Image: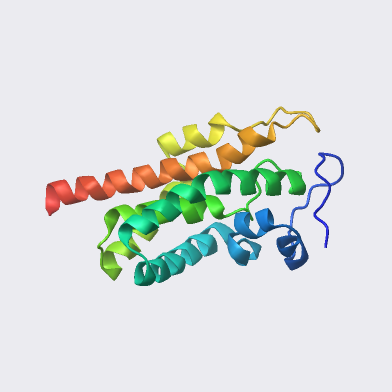
Amino acid sequence: MPAPPATDAGAPIARPTVRFLLAHPAHFIALGCGSGLSRLAPGTVGTLWAWVAFLAMQRWMSAATIGWVILASLPIGWWACTLTARHMRIADPGSIVWDEVVAFWIVLWLIAPAGLLAQLIAFGLFRYFDAAKPGPVRWADALFKQRDAAPGRVRWAAAGFGILFDDIVAAFCTLLVIALWRFFFA
């Protein structure tokens, strides 16, 4: 099954399908192994998938190995998000959830070992920062937006990086709140 053409021509793909998901490895990665196909809150579903995947990684991998997986996931995710956004012809489609996946992995990895309640709080904080985009997250989200780009003029590599960047900032904000909580109340 061939991937869509790598041009900016044509109508945007607002709702990716299973066929689109399986058409290219980048689509499978960027769409969070299918979690981004959710019609309802794909970012939240992608974050939940990330949580489950992290728990599985913790069972079979050392903390150092998980760190290497996360490190490798950043450039691979940039490539996958860039290519998938280009194939969808949308600079930041909501169905791309790899940004939530890798950012939440960073949060869970840095707060480990953490119990279920701490992980649930981290999930809630991360979803708040990612969805509401307060302060620095809004800045990071706007930094790579190309609102005025003419059709065919989108800088796809910048768009792919921007997809990841605001979620990494949301992860940082989540970690900052957790660190402050631990400093003042633990």
Q: Give the residue displayed 41% in from the left and 56% down from the top.
A: 105
Using the image as rendered, state which of residue 82 and residue 65 is in the foreground: 65
Q: Is residue 161 left or right of residue 112?
A: right
Which quadrant is home to the C terminus?
bottom left
32 vs 173, left or right, is right
Which quarter of the image is occupied by the N terminus? bottom right
Residue 169 pos. (x, y %):
42, 40
Instruction: Give residue 36's quadrant in the image.
Output: bottom right
The answer to whether residue 131 is seen in the rendering is: no
Asked if 50 appears above or below 82 in the picture, the reply is below
Q: Nearer the viewer, residue 68 or 160?
A: 68
Q: Is residue 158 visible?
A: yes
Residue nearest the observer in this picture, 182 or 23? 23
Relative horizontal placement of residue 78, taking residue 27 as reference (left or right): left
Q: Position of residue 130 (x, y in %)?
A: 47, 48
Rendered location of residue 156, percent (x, y): 68, 36
Does residue 142 sit above or below 18 in this rendering? above
Residue at screen point 27% across, 63% down: 118
